[in-house]
Amino acid sequence: MLSLKQNVLETMKNGKPDAFVNEWEPFPQVWDPVFYHLFNVAPGGEAINPWGVKIYWGENEPGIMPIVNDETKVCPDVTRWREYVKAPDLHALKLDWTQAKADADKIRAEDKFVHIWLPTGVFEQLHFLMGFEDTLMNFLEEPEAMHELIAYIKDWKLQQVQILIDNLHPDVMNFHDDWGAKHALFMSPDIWREFFKEPYKEIYGLMKKHGVITMHHADSFCQPIAKDMVDVGIDIWQGILPSNDIQQVKKDTDYKLTLMGGIDAAIVDRADWTEEVVRAEVARACKEYHEGGMFIPCLTYGGEGSIFPGVNDCIMDEVRKQSKIYFK
């Protein structure tokens, strides 16, 4: 019987895993002090983050979102972004790494992957600063300024990645950047390639330089750029929605991209959830996507757990049952 880590590695190389990787089981998350500094808000609350963005965490919502309007917009004119956008100085922070290092050591002792989550990727940081509409319009109307601002954000993200690697030596880094909605990208594939492909090559290249498994969360329709995701160095596309043709994505990427997701959160993670519906959705995903390997059944959220109690436990129990069917 393979260990949890061995089973992940066999899945990623399309080798001989002996079960489905069960969601986040091999990837316990370490909550690091940089994260706490950036996302200083509790569920149900609002705050101003270190970039100056007003953020909130809604009740029964899986994560933090910005509040961007004419009054709160940090960058109202991208051609003057240097006047408005001031990245937090990570090197000036007095961060206490004691608990995070202890948590990482405990995970290693359990022979699991030390996993760090980095929310608010490059695209998300843009629309946190200027709003969604301005972000998309500025790709077309002010491309030079957008390239400059993206480079500034990318350089800051590289600092963040390096500081986390230096202090916690993670096995997996999960970068969160949603590039699309349920059925389409937020921009054309060519626009994505023009503005984001090279910055992400640098970010994921730095991770790979240090032997880190690269995970990218995008619970989005990203099938048109799946090959590009491989090109920039992504090992695991986490959060892949069933609206993507998951089997076709495997073929399009020559089975080089592990796909983690496929269980539709909108169907199963609800206040009125039932065990029957949850188990049926898990069984559907395992049946449809197991062929050809490279698949990890998982809720499409960017982190462990469900919003409504009991849902995730039911999912994991059903994944174990499905493993007995497809891995004999």
Image: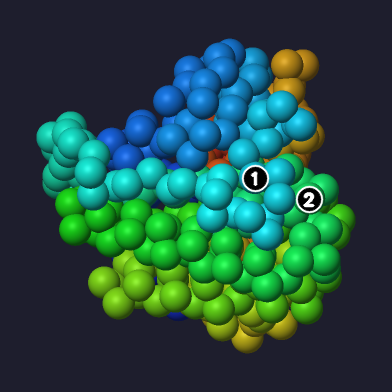
Category of crowding for the residue at label 2, using alpha-carbon neighbours closer than 10 angstroms: few (below 14), some (14–19), many (at least 20) = some
Instruction: Return the disc, 1 or 2, that comes first in the chain's sequence.
Output: 1
Q: Please tell me the numbered disc located at residue 144.
A: none
Residue found at the far bottom of this picture? 254
Quarter assignment of residue 74 = top right
Location of the N terminus by quadrant is bottom left
Residue 77, image x and y in percent?
71, 50
Is residue 124 shown to the viewer in this render?
no
Q: Could you tell me residue 323's position as x and y percent?
A: 54, 53
Name the foreground residue: 160 vs 281. 160
Q: Nearer the viewer, residue 293 or 263?
A: 263
Residue 189 appears in the picture as rendered: yes
At label 1, the amino acid type is: Cys
Q: Tell which of 80 and 260 is nearer to you.
A: 80
Q: Seen in the image, is 261 located left or right of residue 151? A: right
Q: Secondary structure at mark 2?
A: helix
Q: Residue at x 73, y 23 (%)?
A: 270
When the figure is inspected, residue 315 is found, relative to residue 167, above or below; the finding is above
- In the image, which is nearer the foreground, mark 1 or mark 2? 1
Mark 1 vs mark 2, CA separation in Å: 10 Å
- Report the colour scheme: rainbow
Relative to residue 159, is residue 133 drawn left or right? right
Residue 180 falls in image quadrant: bottom right
Disc 2 target residue: 134
Q: Position of residue 191 (x, y in %)?
A: 76, 73
Q: Nearer the viewer, residue 313 or 81?
A: 81
Kindly state the secondary structure of the residue where label 1 is placed: loop
Q: Return the mark for residue 75.
A: 1
Q: Is residue 136 left or right of residue 106?
A: right
